[in-house]
Amino acid sequence: QGQLVESGGGLVQAGGSLRLSCAASGRTISSYKMGWFRQAPGKEREFVAAISRSGGSARYADSVKDRFTISRDNAKNTMYLQMNGLKPEDTAVYYCAADSSGSSYIYTLGSTYDYWGQGTQVTVSS
């Protein structure tokens, strides 16, 4: 069974940066559209960013636009989320996910994603 493994989370001060990685094993991520979601304590999971199979297109939540950048390296079978200008409200567990649907449309609904990682904690102190 393939899996997705997130890394790169941690504790950072407001205004700082982190780079999350999502490494796939047993799956070739070039076959999937990929996305990042997050869930803060007591809140529902929310969409953060997603990227097309080639990496040529991306979508972002309004709350992270211009601060976060999603990218992928299909040769390394890895996806990334560069997070700059972090705010305390960005504190959450961040999950990567893979969408196997044939459409080129980049979905923001978590229910459209088939495979999920275990998550990595990001904590931003004020």
Image (cartoon, helix red, strand yellow):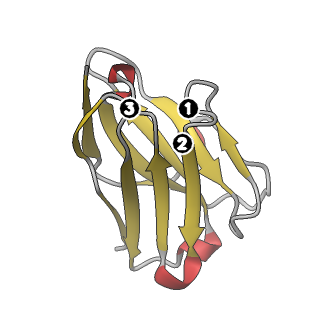
63 displayed left or right of 103: left
Whether residue 107 is visible here, answered yes or no, is: no
Alpha carbon separation for disc pair 2 and 3: 12 Å
Residue at point 32%, 28% (across, down): 14
**What's the CA distance linking mark 1 and mark 2?**
6 Å
Q: Amino acid at mark 2?
A: Phe
Residue located farthest toward the top when viewing the structure as drawn: 42
**Is any part of residue 3 visible from this angle?**
yes
The N terminus - image quarter? bottom left
Q: Which residue is mark 3?
A: 15
The one of 110 and 13 positioned closer to us in this rendering: 13
Q: Which residue is mark 1?
A: 64
Q: Is residue 50 left or right of residue 102?
A: left
On the image, the x and y values in percent for residue 35 come to: 54, 50
Mark in front: 2 vs 3: 3
Q: Is residue 80 above or below residue 125?
A: below
Q: Are marks 1 and 2 in contact (CB under 8 Å)?
A: yes
Q: Position of residue 87 (x, y in %)?
A: 38, 25
Tell me which numbered mark, 2 or 3, is placed earlier along the sequence.
Answer: 3
Q: Quadrant of residue 44?
A: top left
Q: Residue furthest right?
A: 104
Q: Amino acid at mark 3?
A: Gly
The residue that disc 2 covers is: 68
Q: Where is 50 relative to 61, above or below?
A: below
Q: Name the residue located 46 percent from the left edge and 76 percent from the top edge.
A: 27
Q: Hey, which residue is sitting farthest front in the picture?
A: 15
